[in-house]
Amino acid sequence: MRFALAELVNLYEDSLVFEPIYRVFFGCETEKLLDAFRKSEGKFTHTVPYSFNSENGEITFSSDCHIPSGAVTEILEAYAKKNGGKLDYIHGYETALTMGCEDGNIAFFAPCLKKEDLFTSVNTYGPLPKKTFSMGHAEEKRFYTEARRIKK
């Protein structure tokens, strides 16, 4: 028999905050990667901040994904498939910044989906891209390692 543990949360609760999940790409030639962003095409235009080494900037690019974090992921996954490197999803700005500034890495800080836009986005465009947002602050994340059978 299988069991699952679920946490029910009211989406409209004021204390529930949507937090961004940042993208850090490891093992790349940063200028080549940024060039892949500049060459991308699509119907939605996004501008996303990035950091690598001691450089901070913004990259403007186009994608068919309407959510900036999903658009960044698409380009990074395509780049990794063609050129190598590894994509990771990071909670917390400071952690992503530190990791992105290490040699050969770059961090992207796409804005978070607004909580009030969740249902409209899903109704209009369908399922959200993976790791679009996190519910709660990085420091407050709880990870469940086991679920127990609840007896009557």
Image (spheres, grey):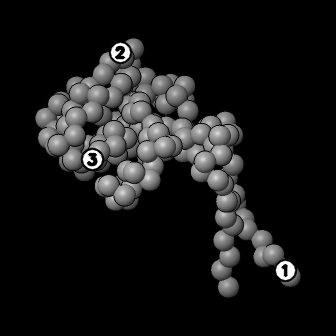
* Quarter assignment of residue 29: top left
Foreground tag (1 vs 2): 1
Gap in Å between the C-alphas at discs 1 and 3? 45 Å
Residue corresponding to mark 3: 65
Q: Amino acid at mark 1?
A: Lys
Residue corresponding to mark 1: 151
* Quarter assignment of residue 32: top left
Q: Amino acid at mark 3?
A: Cys
Q: Which residue is at 43% across, 45% downward?
A: 117
Task: Specify the label residue 55 is tagged with.
Answer: 2
Work out whether residue 104 or residue 19 is closer to the camera in this orientation and state it.
19
In the rendered image, the vertical position of residue 40 relative to residue 149, given as above or below: above
In the rendered image, the vertical position of residue 33 relative to residue 81, given as above or below: above
Q: Which residue is at 16% across, 39% downward?
A: 40
Q: Secondary structure at mark 1?
A: loop
Q: Amino acid at mark 2?
A: Glu
Image position of 152 (left or right of 9): right
Gap in Å between the C-alphas at discs 3 and 2? 26 Å
Q: Which residue is at 55% across, 25% downward?
A: 94
